[in-house]
Amino acid sequence: MLRSSPETVATPPLTSPDAYADEVRAIIVNRPGGPAALRLTETETPAPGPDQVLVKVAAAGVNFIDTYRRSGVYRVAFPHIPGSEGAGTVAALGQRVAGFAVGDQVAWASSATGSYAEYALVDAARLLPAPAGLTLDVAAALPLQGLTADYLTRSTYELGPDDVALIYAAAGGVGGLATQMALAAGARVIAAVGSAAKIETVAGLGVAPHDIVNLAALADLTRDLPAAVRERTGGAGAHVAYDGIGRDTFAATLASLRRRGLAVLFGGASGQVAPFDPQELNAHGSLYLTRPKLDDYVASPDELRERADRLFAAAAAGRLRVAIGRRVPLADASGAHELLESRQSQGKIVLYM
Ligand SMILES: NC(=O)c1ccc[n+]([C@@H]2O[C@H](COP(=O)([O-])OP(=O)(O)OC[C@H]3O[C@@H](n4cnc5c(N)ncnc54)[C@H](OP(=O)(O)O)[C@@H]3O)[C@@H](O)[C@H]2O)c1
């Protein structure tokens, strides 16, 4: 059961390297399972390796990949401390780390140890200075979904004013940010949402009301969504479709694209897509298909920094709205996962310590 939460996460007071306890609270998963597998535990504070930084976590981002790891869809070693995203304060530095100091406010999209914990280790090369002007909970909410939306809309397919993009889960985390970035690039967005409650949210991002499709109102998603997209594009279809839902939507994605369009399958919130026949790409008009992941678009520290700088600058300047849908205490991580998997959430869910 989800407990209530404060409006913002306080900046942690700790700045001294020896001020942390040996035992800290963390969420642990002992064996794969549903949200109830997430248990609060006490664990040893991890010690940084030579190129690592120990961070005191103020807030951790909750992402769909955390649910895949918890449930065993993606293989991890158990016991497993979930979470790869967060923001907080540098508590200690490995011997070879330069460029960060104890007390610095930082954010990250990929921690070396789980971020659902009061302390986590982050490789120095993956650590980002937290942007001035953003609270730590917003800094925690943004990196993973924001960097993903950045590479999807700029690099997997470089959106411009002549493009029509179909974006699923447009009231969600990645979808909400990608929708804003696509509109900022001048593209037209046809936004798919899973309930009437999400229509207003997506309209608030700037999508034209006529271009918002409520999937719950369609009798047959595979037949009716492509028809809705074609009806709105003079019969042609979308140039690109961003599909993080997967199993339930993939057939509709292929059928919604125009000739030589690009299907970007970047997740499986409804389940993974079954193996399929490449002849389908031929049958739908010489389509392209890609299955990208964030790691491959931030592999070098330079690319990571370039994307993060752009992302944080846009958020700090108010050009990118970071919607935190729910703030949940660490102890209630299972409630956070239940909410994300229930399809009821909007924007980002963050855990605070
Ligand atoms: N490849 C990458 O680099 C990368 C990186 C980050 C995230 N992702 C993927 O991006 C997707 C979105 O992640 P997110 O963290 O931003 O989550 P999110 O979009 O905030 O939440 C998931 C959304 O998926 C939709 N959905 C449709 N069918 C669903 C089902 N059966 N169960 C649950 N949700 C369903 C729901 O929106 P509607 O009700 O509006 O349909 C739901 O709100 C996930 O597939 C994730 O794995 C990929």
Image (spheres, rainbow, N blue to C red):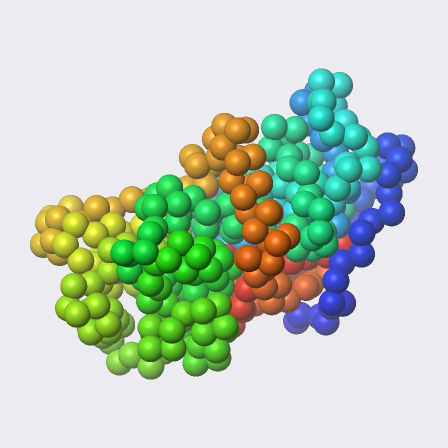
Picture mark count: 0
Residue in view at x 55 percent, y 64 percent = 347
Quadrant hosting ligand 1: bottom left
Residue 227 falls left or right of residue 92? left
x%, y% of residue 340?
A: 53, 64
Q: Between residue 232 and residue 328, name the one nearer to us.
A: 232
Residue in view at x 77 percent, y 37 percent = 104
x%, y% of residue 216?
A: 36, 78
In the displayed structure, 310 sits above or below 52; it is: below
Residue in view at x 43 percent, y 44 percent = 151
Q: Between residue 36 and residue 2, name the one nearer to us.
A: 2
Q: Quadrant of the C terminus?
A: bottom right
In the displayed structure, 288 sits above or below 52; it is: below
x%, y% of residue 180?
A: 46, 60
Residue 263 visible to an observer of this rendering: yes
Residue 291, image quadrant: top left
Q: Between residue 225 and residue 76, name the one nearer to us.
A: 225
x%, y% of residue 223?
A: 20, 72
